[in-house]
Amino acid sequence: ASSVSTSTSLAASTTSSPKKDLKVARVVLLGREAKQNSAAKPNEQRKETSCTSNRITRTLTDLDVFSAGVHQMMALLEPGQALGHLSDFAKEYGTEAFCKRLLRKHDGNVKKASEKFKQALAWRQAHKEVLTSRKFALGGDERLIGSDLQRRPVIYMCMKNQILPGAQCVDQKIVTMLQAIDSMPGGVETTVHIWDLH
């Protein structure tokens, strides 16, 4: 059996500012619509222009809300805020790119995305040892075996060859996922899991 998750990036750059993102989005949207409208008849073109304006307004509004959500989440890392007490190691993962992925996952719901943001960084702080040393007790046959045709890392796990109870295999799972992430080429954010259940 295999399990595949998917995600799509809304922004090409993780370091660009919200204003720059909106400006780029506006130029791209207008350029696309202008090209489509250039071949239309006059009456059709007027109707299409009106529809285009409405679509662009809605899209830019969504981008504005999205950017505001990212800044609201990043503010949690500031001193005196919910995540301000965390170590630099934990905060290192609290990037705008991570905030954007969480917001996409939760359809722009800042409250839900913020809760996951807090949980993820707190978990990172609690598991610093295994994340940095990548040492674990071998609990079974779970390993990175390559990638698929879409260049996603493929992780194989054989249930029959599990040696230790599941609770004692967590560190191995963490290290295997880190290895998968390390092998991801640019633009790939998901993995394929093969569970051999025998």
Image (spheres, helix red, strand yellow):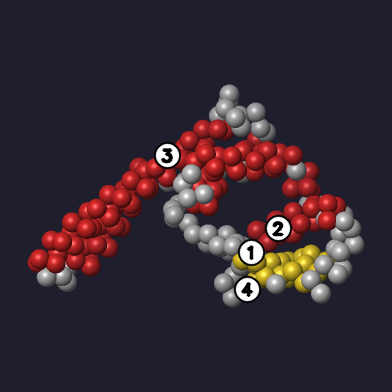
The amino acid type, in three-letter code, at marker 3 is Ala
Q: Which residue is mark 3?
A: 68
Q: Residues within 10 Å of mark 3 (few under 14, many from 20)?
A: some
Q: Position of residue 75 (x, y in %)?
A: 51, 33
Q: Earlier in the sequence, mark 1 or mark 4?
A: 4
The amino acid type, in three-letter code, at marker 1 is Thr
Q: CA distance from mark 1 to mark 2?
A: 9 Å
* Mark 1 residue element: loop
Q: Which residue is mark 2?
A: 177
Residue 186 shows in the view: no
* Horizontal side of residue 26 vs 182, given as left or right: left
> What residue do we see at 18% from left, 59% from top?
49
Mark number displayed over residue 191: 1
Q: Earlier in the sequence, mark 1 or mark 2?
A: 2
**Mark 4 or 3, closer to the camera:** 3
Q: Residues within 10 Å of mark 2 (few under 14, many from 20)?
A: some
The amino acid type, in three-letter code, at marker 2 is Met
Q: CA distance from mark 3 to mark 2?
A: 31 Å
Residues marked 1 and 2 touching at CB (< 8 Å): yes
Mark number displayed over residue 148: 4
